[in-house]
Image (spheres, grey):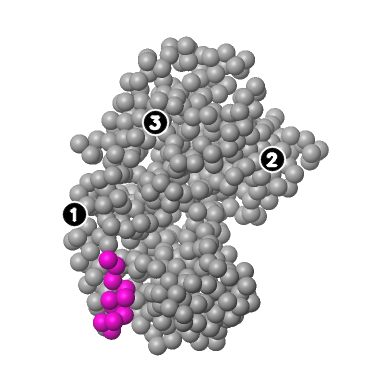
């Protein structure tokens, strides 16, 4: 059955070769490349009523990208119409909608399909998917494009449920609620808060910003893209390619400080402190906003208006820990009551636990949450032993602190595409990464991370799994090294199964015959550490 045709019986199980979950950069990128490769038997499940992923869900005031527009876009779909160096949320969402139309993805999309469970059927070598709307699919291959920034994280604070005013997380911003004249509490000082706080501070009666740890903030080199530049990008596309290449290598150079020589971060730290000193004249407030850890240990943020917003007379920065929430106030551990009408949580996402329990169950019904009880891990951030034919895009240890995630997404998409082409060529019903290959790869990743700024900078961040302290989020080096590591698909890294569950030759050869395939990939992934 072609994935684009729906049977008249809505209760029937839809059969498809590939099921993609999510329609953000990851899901759309996978779908576009499948079509370009001539593979049309796939469906994209989207829980919402439109594409866009995090750029659809996050629409708080001031929402924008902190990576330059020209690198925060698909290499195969440059956008000469960007209006700013750092695109804002509506423009990025419009870009993804344009890609959907331009590459003919709309017929493959199924909106209103929130995944309830995905269970691997070992006998049939297929994933059985159930959605909250009652739809059921059967797919040979399951590609997760759900990403790590899709599930909002809320703090565990006593009395949160007793608050009688308005509350919402920045991801679920309520634009209908009038902030004018309100007493507002903002909990969290991460990437979202530094964007929306300057937007709402002039509108509210008072704003209490509850800060646990101040972030390092660099100036934001943002500006409007001039009409003459847009004309060049439209009529001389190589000019935009040059711009993209220059920006990529400028950003890539920052990996030296993050992962190779963390001592270099001290130089960048001086720039950030100069930015703070120039924008915050009050020495007491400046001390409150000065981090006590090495720059880069937590996510580095960029802003030109955050510090001025905190210097406003109607804004206060509260550093005492929160003891509890009462019906009309936030109470800090020193006993001070902060009466508020509205609480906004800028507390980020559940990065360490990207999948809720019961969502994905692999061989023998094992829940991926149990597989990851000691922290998330995967081979090349993509495949996991015990979960045949499951591919993750933006999986464990694929995040970046220095460059564009779209670059990493494209690298993984190409790896998945090569895997599917190899499966088709060798008539494999299923493939599963070998446990020893995946273990060796992740041991190497953790060794490299142990020398990086995220482990040596003197802080705890959302990059680290709260249960183990291991960094399960970031890639430990240059982004181009990841692309090298994913540039070819080696079947020797995998078990391969024929339709009748008879192992193919790649399984018969035994584990000892394929150590070289995994080791070569590890060498490519870790070359920058030698």
Q: Residue sitting at 35 percent across and 25 percent down?
A: 518
Q: Nearer the viewer, mark 3 or mark 1?
A: 3
Residue under label 3: 439
Q: Against 290, is 266 above or below?
A: above
Mark earlier in primary sequence (2, 1)? 2
Seen in the image, is 340 located left or right of residue 235? right
The residues colored magenta run: 282-292
Residue under label 1: 263
Residue under label 2: 130
Q: Quadrant of the N terminus?
A: top right
Identify the image quadrant of residue 86: bottom left
Q: Residue 350, can we see it?
A: yes
Identify the image quadrant of residue 316: bottom left
Q: Residue sitting at 55 percent across and 74 percent down?
A: 325
User: What count of labels does the image hold?
Assistant: 3
Q: Quadrant of the C terminus?
A: top left
Q: Residue 231, can we see it?
A: no
Q: Which mark is residue 358?
A: none
Q: CA distance from mark 2 to mark 1?
A: 50 Å
Helix, strand or loop status at disc 3: helix
């Amino acid at each position: 059955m072609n994935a684009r045709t729906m049977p008249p019986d809505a209760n029937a199980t839809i059969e498809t070769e590939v099921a993609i979950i999510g329609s953000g950069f990851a899901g759309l990128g996978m779908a576009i490349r499948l079509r370009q490769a001539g593979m049309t038997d796939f469906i994209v499940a989207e829980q919402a009523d439109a594409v866009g992923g995090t750029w659809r869900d996050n629409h708080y005031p001031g929402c924008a990208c902190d990576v330059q527009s020209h690198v925060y876009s698909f290499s195969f779909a440059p956008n000469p119409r960007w209006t700013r160096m750092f695109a804002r949320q509506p423009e990025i969402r419009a870009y993804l909608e344009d890609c959907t139309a331009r590459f003919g993805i709309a017929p493959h999309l199924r909106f209103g399909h929130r995944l309830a469970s995905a269970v691997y059927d070992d006998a049939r070598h297929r994933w059985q998917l159930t959605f909250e709307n009652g739809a059921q699919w059967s797919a040979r291959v399951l590609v997760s494009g759900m990403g790590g920034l899709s599930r909002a994280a809320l703090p565990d604070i006593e009395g949160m449920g007793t608050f009688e005013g308005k509350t919402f997380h920045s991801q679920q911003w309520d634009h209908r609620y009038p902030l004018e004249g309100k007493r507002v509490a903002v909990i969290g000082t991460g990437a979202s808060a530094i964007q929306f706080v300057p937007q709402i501070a002039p509108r509210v009666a008072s704003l209490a910003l509850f800060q646990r740890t101040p972030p390092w903030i660099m100036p934001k080199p943002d500006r409007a893209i001039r009409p003459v530049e847009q004309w060049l990008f439209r009529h001389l596309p190589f000019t935009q390619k040059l711009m993209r290449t220059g920006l990529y290598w400028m950003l890539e150079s920052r990996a030296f400080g993050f992962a190779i020589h963390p001592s270099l971060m001290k130089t960048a730290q001086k720039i950030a402190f100069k930015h703070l000193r120039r924008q915050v004249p009050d020495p007491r407030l400046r001390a409150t906003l000065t981090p006590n850890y090495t720059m880069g240990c937590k996510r580095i943020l960029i802003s030109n208006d955050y510090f001025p917003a905190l210097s406003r007379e109607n804004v206060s920065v509260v550093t005492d820990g929160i003891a509890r929430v009462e019906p009309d106030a936030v109470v800090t551990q020193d006993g001070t009551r902060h009466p508020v009408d509205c609480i906004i949580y800028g507390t980020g996402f559940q990065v360490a636990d990207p999948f809720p329990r019961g969502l994905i169950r692999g061989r023998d019904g094992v829940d991926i949450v149990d597989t990851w009880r000691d922290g998330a891990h995967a081979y090349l951030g993509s495949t996991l032993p015990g979960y045949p034919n499951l591919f993750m895009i933006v999986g464990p240890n694929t995040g970046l602190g220095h460059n564009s995630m779209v670059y990493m997404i494209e690298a993984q998409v190409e790896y998945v595409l090569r895997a599917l082409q190899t499966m088709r060529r060798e008539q494999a019903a299923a493939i599963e990464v070998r446990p020893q290959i995946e273990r060796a790869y992740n041991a190497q990743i953790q060794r490299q991370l142990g020398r990086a700024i995220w482990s040596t900078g003197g802080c705890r961040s959302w990059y680290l799994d709260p249960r183990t302290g291991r960094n399960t989020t970031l890639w430990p080096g240059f982004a181009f090294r990841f692309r090298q590591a994913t540039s070819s698909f080696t079947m020797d890294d995998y078990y391969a199964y024929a339709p009748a569950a008879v192992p193919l030759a790649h399984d018969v050869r035994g584990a000892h015959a394929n150590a070289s395939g995994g080791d070569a990939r590890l060498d490519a992934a870790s070359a920058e550490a030698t």
